[in-house]
Amino acid sequence: MAKHLCAIDQGTTQTTVLVLSEELEILSRVSREFSQIYPHPGWVEHDPEAIWNSVTGALNSALRRAEITGDDLAGIGITNQRETTVLWERSTGRPIHNAIVWQCRRTADLCDELRNGGHAETFSQATGLVLDPYFSGTKVRWILDHVADARSRAEAGELAFGTMDSYLVWKLTGGVSHVTDLSNASRTLMCNIHRGAWDPELLKLLDIPASLLPKIVGNSGVVGETRGVDGLPDGIPISGMAGDQQAALFGQACFTEGSVKCTYGTGSFLMMNVGSKPVSSSRGLLSTVAWQLDGRITYALEGSLFIAGAAVQWLRDGLGIIPNAPDSERLALEVEDTGGVIFVPALAGLGAPHWRPEARGIISGLTRSTTGAHLARACLEGIALQVTDLIGAMQLDADRPLNVLKVDGGAAANDLLMQFQADVLQTTLSRPVNLETTAIGAAFLAGLGVGVWKDTDAVREAWQQERRFEPSLSAAAVEAILQRWHEAVAKA
């Protein structure tokens, strides 16, 4: 039996394909970027065909670099930018409009209308989400209302809706499989996460015909086979799917209740496994599906920060004090501490748990002796302190302690940031060998689906730790840092 796995990581700005061995050795990695489309201020679109071309281009290049063929693949796993919405013709597979991206704010008025109509609690209780343009449901409604004949064609069963996982499976299987996994379905405002099914009441409120919707499936298991894909033989199983943050949680082997991962990318995404029952948040976090395996649903709490690695990019591009993002650590290590400088990186407002979109970044504690090194260190510490606030809110909502934080994403390679994070959390951090846990999660799910791994215990054994970071500051020192931080946040 072939044991190689292919992970398709379909992101917001590029598609990355990894070919991995059973031992999770990365045999090849190829990325293909595609264009961002901004028709109006606050609107963001993608060309679905450009995304598909990025997938096939990266896939074929990755196989060539790994010096294998499609016949050597045991399965394909997919992970994707969540909430991004596309509608296409069932007969031809052609999209009827550009995909509306998760970042797009065009449906803000519709969200306000539903909220003012008293429906916010209905959506919240069923989906664990808030009424916001971020999610897919109002995007579908916009396309039905604004594309000629879209509604009548949808009601006639001529059109299909999907998030990117669904669209890619349709394309990979030559239009045979119209499915979505439960983690992606849970981000649409149309899925009742308690039942793991589309919700007729929500569809009625959104005025979306059920005939558009894909079948909801679990996250691991064969949902179709390749058919008619350039460069690939027919018959390769598509055997794992998950939204990007859920895939990262799975890729970090966070299978026990209370386990937490934080992805340090442009922003930061925090997710906690809360077990077999969803947990409602009173602190602005989202309740969502983590995954569904063998019919059993695991739930998660999720919180996100708008700015993490983007703050380091600002040091590079805005202030020009570092030539490259990784140089932030080198510069920050030139000083032993921040010299009293606190940087609140609210460059796009403050997200959970503060939820202050009007907030602006602030640097406090400047003196004549402040240098670029102090600013660089304060920037890294500000990222960690934001995460600390978010983890505190998550622990209170879930009523669970944090024993270990698993970390991933590009900025998790910064040892200084990770050590300070461990210090202010007073908690151990665990960093994996491979920081691309989103793709690793897709590979794990695909491998489970075709028997490369027997169960999650075998997946846990396959996961590899690269380094642990243990707290080194005293509780008194941490308390003083947090006090200065909270005083600065209040002024942001």
Image (cartoon, rainbow, N blue to C red):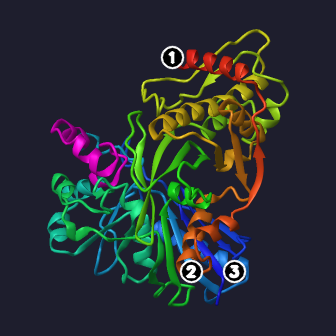
Image: 277 above or below 223: above
Residue at 39% over, 64% down: 182
Type of amino acid under label 3: Arg
Q: Which mark is residue 490?
A: 1
Which label's residue is closer to the chain start, 3 or 2? 3
Helix, strand or loop status at disc 2: strand
Which label's residue is closer to the chain start, 1 or 2? 2
**The one of 39 and 185 positioned closer to us in this rendering:** 185
Mark 3 touches mark 2? (CB < 8 Å): no
Residue at 54% over, 45% down: 269
| Image spot of residue 447 (x, y percent) | 59, 76
Image: 300 above or below 8: above
Q: Is residue 131 magenta?
A: yes
Helix, strand or loop status at disc 1: helix
Q: Is residue 58 magenta?
A: no
Image: 125 above or below 482: below
Within 10 Å of disc 3 (Cα), the crowding (few <14, some 14-19, many 20+) is few
Type of amino acid under label 1: Ala
Task: Name the residue carrying label 2.
Answer: 75
Which label's residue is closer to the chain start, 3 or 1? 3
Q: Quadrant of residue 376?
A: top right
Residue at 48% over, 34% down: 396
Report the Cα–Cα distance between label 3 and label 1.
54 Å
Image: 157 above or below 50: below
Task: Name the residue carrying label 3.
Answer: 64
Residue 47, visible in the rendered structure? no
Residue 242 shown left or right of residue 84 in the figure: right
Q: Which mark is residue 159?
A: none
Type of amino acid under label 2: Gly
Mark 3 touches mark 1? (CB < 8 Å): no
Which residues make up the magenta segment?
A: 111-138
**Among all residues in the image, which is located at the extreme top?**
368
